[in-house]
Image: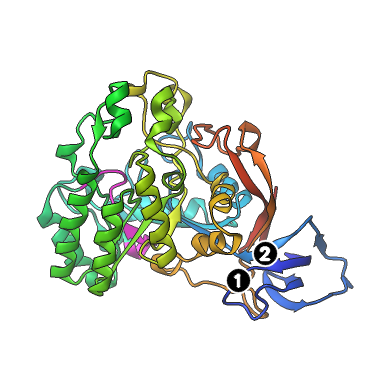
Amino acid sequence: MNVLIKSATIIDSESAFHNKKQDILIENGLITQIADSIKNSNSYKEISKDNLHASQGWFDSSVCFGEPGFEERETINNGLKTAAKSGFTAVAINANTQPIIDTHSDVYFLKSKSKYSLVDLLPIGALTKNSDGNELAELFDMTSAGAVAFGDYKKSLSSSNLIKVALQYVESFNGLICSFPQEKSLTENSVMHEHITSTSIGLKGAPSIAEELQIARDLVLLEYTNGKLHIPTISTANSVELIRNAKRKKLNVSCSVAIHNLIFTDAVLSDFDTNFKVTPPLRSATDIDALITGLKDGTIDMVTSDHNPLNIELKKIEFNDASFGTIGLESAFGALNKIFSTKTAIKLLTRGKKRFGLSPQSLDIGNRANVSLFNPKGDYTFNKNHISSKSTNSIFMGSKLSGRVYGSINNNKLELT
């Protein structure tokens, strides 16, 4: 692939051209020239867009596609195309499938389906067999097939010993354990955050302490084992403080937050809109403030769309019976760009790469072209026309977002919206 990007403002703190408006020449997937002006002497495809900006390709650490087993929700092929159109050049895929991704051959299947994709697919293998929480899955074998981490998607592990053994076992091959932060016995039948709104509308709430107890336990086990732990999608102020203290102790822990947990409070559920039914649940304004502070000071390592496509019959039913989850790839940049500066939004979309084994490629001459293209200006109302996913269960439906994604470049391929 040969392409000439014209007059793009480069947002990449690791690049020698950071904050500069430059032409970028890409030949056979490599950046061969960056300059104020480059003549298109070879008649390459030109990309010239309004207020064009370019950054390192974005990464999402928690994505579901459905395939295998739930292709009606999303296929790998269309999911990766959606990610590319949304500016992402790498996504970590959860073991939220049927069968569960818990063997070498399962991971190999995912990798083979994405072999020629623009977007790098990074499988997260199940931590336990069939994600049932009873017995560790084939962690080393999955690593050899390409798994980058291990976790049971949205399922907490009750057995402290199993987490301890997992943290010790993967140390020999630098494996990363993901532990969903929720104490199940405190959240049974809950459908939202336990707070004033849950009481006023009569829905069963999940208390913040259910998340915090699990995190506290896992951090104690991490300190005991000297392992490597990732805590996905934290949502409470006390969770931020627990992880902040763990990092002060130099524990090898990272965490993420779902973008929608930075924007919406539990108050939006007063209308019983199932698009807002997610886990962890939407919390309070105080929690949002703490989460944003945690992102700014580095306590929270990364953001995620927590993209989880669901077919319509799982959402268009009574609130108590509806499934948890929202799509989020298409709205991720516009939502972040609404609440942070553009430079901060880009930093948040790229800084989780190393934790999941990716080598960041700065926008510099000689590097592989791994690029997200976007315009940070312009507000719009998110609607179905902005959705590329097969499913449309978006928490951001009808929300005002800011900025437009033009596409992405990676693996010697180009995808434009």
145 in magenta: yes
Residue plotted at (33% across, 56% down): 104
Q: Earlier in the sequence, mark 2 or mark 1?
A: 1
Quadrant in the picture for residue 385: top right
Please name the predominant secondary structure of the magenta segment in the image.
loop
The image position of residue 297, as x and y in percent, is: 40, 67
Quadrant in the picture for residue 163: bottom left
Q: What residue is disc 2 on?
A: 54
The amino acid type of the residue labelled 2 equals: Ala
326 in magenta: no
Q: Is residue 362 left or right of residue 3?
A: left
The reply to whether residue 316 is visible in this rendering is yes
Task: Answer few, some or many: residues within 10 Å of disc 1's Cα (few below 14, many 20 plus, some between 14 and 19).
Answer: many
The image position of residue 222, as x and y in percent, is: 19, 65
Q: What residue is disc 1 on?
A: 12
Check the image and report above or below for 88 versus 351: above
The answer to whether the residue labelled 2 contacts the one labelled 1, judged by CB atoms less than 8 Å apart, is: yes
Check the image and report above or below for 69 versus 331: above
Q: Residue furthest left?
A: 161
Secondary structure found at label 2: strand
Region rendered in magenta: 143-156
Residue plotted at (88% across, 66% down): 43
**Separation (CA) of disc 2 from disc 1:** 8 Å
Task: Answer few, some or many: residues within 10 Å of disc 2's Cα (few below 14, many 20 plus, some between 14 and 19).
Answer: many
The amino acid type of the residue labelled 1 equals: Asp
Residue plotted at (45% across, 21% down): 316
Quadrant in the picture for residue 17: bottom right
